[in-house]
Image (tube, coloured by chain):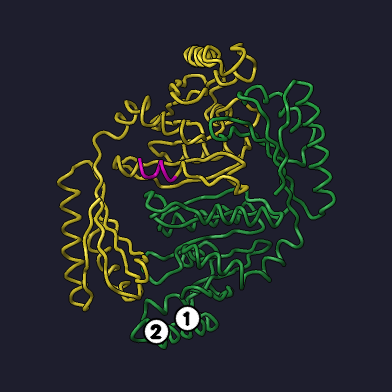
Chain colours: A green, B yellow
C-alpha cells in the first residue's frame, strides 16, 4: 500500500486563524486512491522546523510526502527553500517554472487584472525550485506546484489556497498520481445500530478487529434528530477490487451475526 | 511564552472521514491565552506511533502537550496506554477516575438512558490512568480527561468528541490552564488594502517583519463579493498588555506609512 505523509505549513494554521481543510481533503483523496495517510503534521513558517519535518518524513521512507502552503511570493513563503535544505539541492531558476509564471502574469495583465506583468523579485521567487525538481502547472493561481524525487520517495509541494491545491490535484497532477497509486481500490460500508451505549459494543468490535485484520472497523455515536445511534464503519483498501469487497463482506456478515447474538439490531447498511 | 504541541489521535482523521476541528479550536484557545502552538500532528490509533509522538514532544521540552481522542471504551482507544509507555508510568485503576465513571453510569441508568450501570471491562477501562496522573471530570461524556506532569511539561489528554473536549476545557480544566498560562494577552489587528496583486506587497511586508520581530504579520487575498482585497493581519502575544498593544500600534503606523509611499491605500482597520 502507498504510504503518505502530509506536512501542512503556515503560521495562520497554528494561530487557529485558518482551519486546515486541505489535509482532510488530501486524506480523502489518498484513501480513495487506495493509499494510506500515516501522519499529518502542521508547522509554522519556520525554515528549520519545515526542513526537519521533511527530513524526518524522508527517513521514515514514505512513498509520498505532500507539503501544502508556503509557495507564494511573500518572504514567509519558504517551503521550497526548506525542501532545498532538507534534500541538499539548492534553489535555482527553473526554466519551465519561469515560463509558467511569466505567461500567467502576462495573462493577468492582458485581462486588466494587474497593471504590469514585469517579473519583480517577488514574482520571480516562484520560479525558483530545488535543483532536479519539476514544476506542475497551477491552473488557478500563479505559483506552480513542485515535484521532487528522493530515492523511492516522491515529494509534492502544493499551494495552500484550497482552490489552487484542488485544481492542481484534480488536473495536471493526475498522471503522476496514477503512476504512484496505480489502480488502487477503496470501499466503505456503514452499519447503524440502535444501541445507546458504545461501551456495549467494545468487546464485539475488539473480536471483529482481531478476526478481520484487512478491514478497518470503527464505531462512533451519531445523533439522528433526538435519537442517538452507533455508526460502525468498515473500510478496506488494496490493489484488487474483488479482494477488498470480499474482505468487507466477510467482516460485515460476521459483525451482523455477533451483534444479533448480543441482542443488538442492525438497522441499515449504507455503502459509499 | 508558553509553547504548546497538539497530538490529534484517530484513524478516522487520517482516512479523511472526520475533519479535525479540535486542533483548530485548541489553537485559537491557546493563542487567545497568549501561548503559542508550535506544532500539531495527527496520528492513527497505533500504540507505537502515538508513543513516539509523545516522546518526541517531551524531548522538545514544550510547556504543554495536548492529546485529543482515544480515551473511550473501545479497544482502539489507546491514548493513555501510549502515555503510560512514553513516560514509563504503567496504567492502573485511578480511584478518583473510578468514582467519576461509576457515578456517570449510575446517572445514565437513573435517567433510563442505559439499562444497567455495571462497570463492565469496557467501562472500567476508562478508569485506568498512568501512575501519577490525575483525572479531570468530563461534564459531557463518560471518559474523564487526564493530566500528567513530566518534569517541566504538562501533558493533558482530552477526548476526541468536540463537545466533550470543549466542555472540559471551558469548565474543569480552567484552574490548571490559568496556572500554566498566567494572565497572558493577545491582540490582533487587520488592515484591508485595495491591491489586486499580493506580490506587490511582498517587499513591504518583508521590511515590516524584519523591523517588528515581536509582531506576526501575514497577508492573505480575500474576496468581498466580486472584489478581491488583501487582508494584512498583525498580531502579537505576551504577558504584558501595554507592551503587546504598543508593539502592534508601532508596526501598524510603520505599515500604513510604507503602503502610502508605494501608492497603496489602507481601507479599513479592524480589531479583534
Q: Which subunit holds the residue at mark 1?
A: A
User: Which of the two labelled residues, at mark 1 and mark 2, occupies the earlier sequence position?
Assistant: 1
Q: Which residue does the image show at 54% across and 35% down from the upper left?
A: A225
| Chain hosting mark 2 | A
Left of A35 or right of it: where is A212? right
Residue occupying image coordinates x 54% and y 45% = B42
Mark 1 and mark 2, same subunit?
Answer: yes
Query: Residue A107: x percent and y percent?
Result: 45, 85
From this viewpoint, is residue B94 visible?
no
Q: Secondary structure of the magenta portion, mostly? A: helix
Instruction: Tell me, for residue A119, which label it has, or none.
Output: 2
Residue at 40%, 39% (x, y): give it.
B62
Residue B23 picture location, percent across and down: 45, 43
Whether residues under marks 1 and 2 lie with C-beta atoms below 8 angstroms apart, the answer is yes
Alpha-carbon distance for marks 1 and 2?
Answer: 8 Å
Q: Whole-percent x and y of residue A262? A: 75, 20
* Pick the front one: A20 or A233: A233
**Left or right relative to B187: residue B118:** right
Give the image location of residue A213, x and y in percent.
Answer: 77, 38
Q: Which residue is mark 1?
A: A101
The answer to which image quadrant residue A169 occupies is bottom right
Region in magenta: B24-29
Residue B246's tag is: none
B27 within the magenta span: yes
Q: Does B191 appear above or below B122?
A: below
Amino acid at each position: 500500500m502507498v504510504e503518505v505523509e502530509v506536512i501542512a505549513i503556515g503560521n495562520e494554521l497554528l494561530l487557529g486563524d485558518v482551519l486546515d481543510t486541505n489535509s482532510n481533503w488530501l486524506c480523502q483523496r489518498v484513501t480513495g486512491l487506495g493509499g494510506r495517510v500515516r501522519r499529518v503534521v502542521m508547522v509554522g513558517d519556520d525554515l528549520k522546523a519545515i526542513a526537519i519535518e521533511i527530513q524526518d518524513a524522508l527517513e521514515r521512507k514514505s512513498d509520498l510526502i505532500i507539503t501544502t502552503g508556503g509557495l507564494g511570493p511573500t518572504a514567509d513563503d519558504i517551503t521550497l527553500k526548506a525542501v532545498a535544505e532538507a534534500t541538499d539541492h539548492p534553489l535555482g531558476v527553473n526554466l519551465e517554472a519561469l515560463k509558467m509564471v511569466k505567461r500567467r502574469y502576462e495573462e493577468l495583465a492582458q485581462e486588466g487584472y494587474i497593471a504590469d506583468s514585469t517579473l519583480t523579485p517577488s514574482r520571480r521567487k516562484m520560479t525558483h525550485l530545488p535543483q532536479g525538481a519539476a514544476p506542475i502547472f497551477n491552473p488557478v493561481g500563479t505559483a506552480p506546484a513542485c515535484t521532487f524525487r528522493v530515492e523511492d520517495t516522491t515529494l509534492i509541494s502544493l499551494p495552500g489556497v484550497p482552490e489552487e491545491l484542488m485544481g492542481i490535484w484534480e488536473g495536471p497532477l493526475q498522471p503522476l498520481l496514477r503512476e504512484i497509486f496505480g489502480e488502487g481500490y477503496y470501499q466503505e460500508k456503514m452499519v447503524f445500530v440502535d444501541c445507546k451505549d458504545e461501551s456495549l459494543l467494545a468487546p464485539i468490535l475488539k473480536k471483529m478487529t482481531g478476526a478481520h485484520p484487512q478491514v478497518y472497523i470503527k464505531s462512533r455515536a451519531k445523533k439522528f434528530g433526538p435519537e442517538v445511534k452507533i455508526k460502525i464503519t468498515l473500510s478496506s483498501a488494496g490493489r484488487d477490487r474483488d479482494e477488498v469487497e470480499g474482505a468487507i463482506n466477510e467482516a460485515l456478515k460476521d459483525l451482523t451475526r455477533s451483534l444479533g447474538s448480543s441482542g443488538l439490531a442492525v438497522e441499515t447498511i449504507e455503502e459509499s
